[in-house]
Amino acid sequence: MNIPTIRAIILDFGGVLLQPGDPAVHESLARELGISADTLRREIFVGPLSLAAQRGEISPQALWAALARQWGLPAEKGEWLAMRFWEGIRIDTELADWLRQRKRRYRTGLLSNAWSDLRDLLQRLGIDDAFHAMVISAEEHLMKPDPAIYRLMLERLGVEPAEAVFVDDRLENVHAAHTLGMRTVQFRHRGQALAELRNLGVG
């Protein structure tokens, strides 16, 4: 049986391109708020308010204002809270550069459960040009692992499932892509992911 050639590389954002930075930043902020650093990150990334923002039900600004109130601050401190939190996060620009260098040979995509400000963030960071297409959950009101959001990504890239490889850190999202017939890599760190992509023939 002939295995289709990979024509598209699709990356997740959080946990792949977005990575933890200096842990001391979040630990310091959490102490000020009277919570643990794990609680801080969990609420911001996967808590109920975050999931509502990822579904496009509330804006990122409303999210931060609500989290500020939740942690005993006035709502207008939401912007301060966001600024402090993002100081403890880094973006893997080397991985973005790797993908950008492959745009001539492959269709490249970003498929992310993320808030509605992600597209603007990527533009400000100067890495939005690494992608031929982006599918962001808040914009589409769809979230991984719903098969519909993967199909939308494939449609925008103009490829069949077997012609795409999807990289995500969350196992349930990788499983969903695999079930659709996509090649998959579960991301643990950049070196591991790039080695697995090479093993799949992505050069």
Image: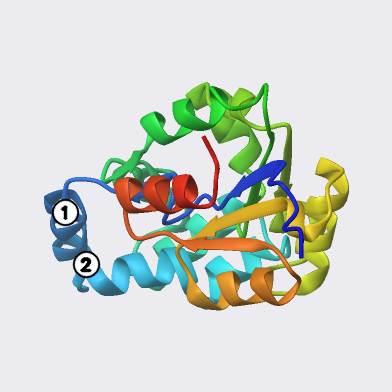
Q: Disc 1 marks which amino acid?
A: Pro
Q: Give how far apart the Cα atoms at labels 1 and 2 are.
A: 9 Å
> Which label belongs to residue 23?
1
Q: Quadrant of the N terminus?
A: bottom right
Residue 141 visible to the viewer: no
Q: Would residue 99 be found to the left or right of residue 131 on screen?
A: left
> Image quarter for residue 160?
bottom right
- Give the residue type at disc 2: Ala
Q: Identify whether 124 is placed above or below 88.
A: above
Quarter-wise, where is residue 151 in the image?
bottom right
Left or right, 117 with reference to 32: right
| Residue at 66% from the left image edge and 32% from the top image edge | 131
Horizontal relation, residue 22 to residue 2: left or right = left
Q: What element carries label 2?
A: helix
Residue at the far front in the pictured view = 1
Q: Is mark 1 on a helix, strand or loop?
A: helix
User: Local crowd at mark 2 within 10 Å, few (<14), some, or many (≥20)?
Assistant: some
Residue 82 location, x and y as percent? 40, 47
**Residue depicted at 78% across the width and 72% down the height:** 147
> Observer-nearest residue: 174 or 203?
203
Is residue 18 left or right of 50 when viewed as pictured?
Answer: left
Q: Position of residue 84 (x, y in %)?
A: 29, 45
**Of the image marks 1 and 2, the number of the one nearer the N terminus:** 1
Q: Are marks 1 and 2 in contact (CB under 8 Å)?
A: yes
Q: Where is residue 72 in the image (x, y as percent from the top left)?
A: 33, 69
Residue shown at 63% from the left, 61% from the top? 183
Q: Which of 81 and 99 is in front in this view?
A: 99
Location of residue 140 in the rendering, given as x and y in whole percent from the top left corner: 81, 57
Instruction: Look at 48% across and 56% down and name the residue there.
Output: 64
The mark found on residue 37 in the picture is 2
Q: Identify the image's colour scheme: rainbow, by chain, secondary structure or one colour.
A: rainbow
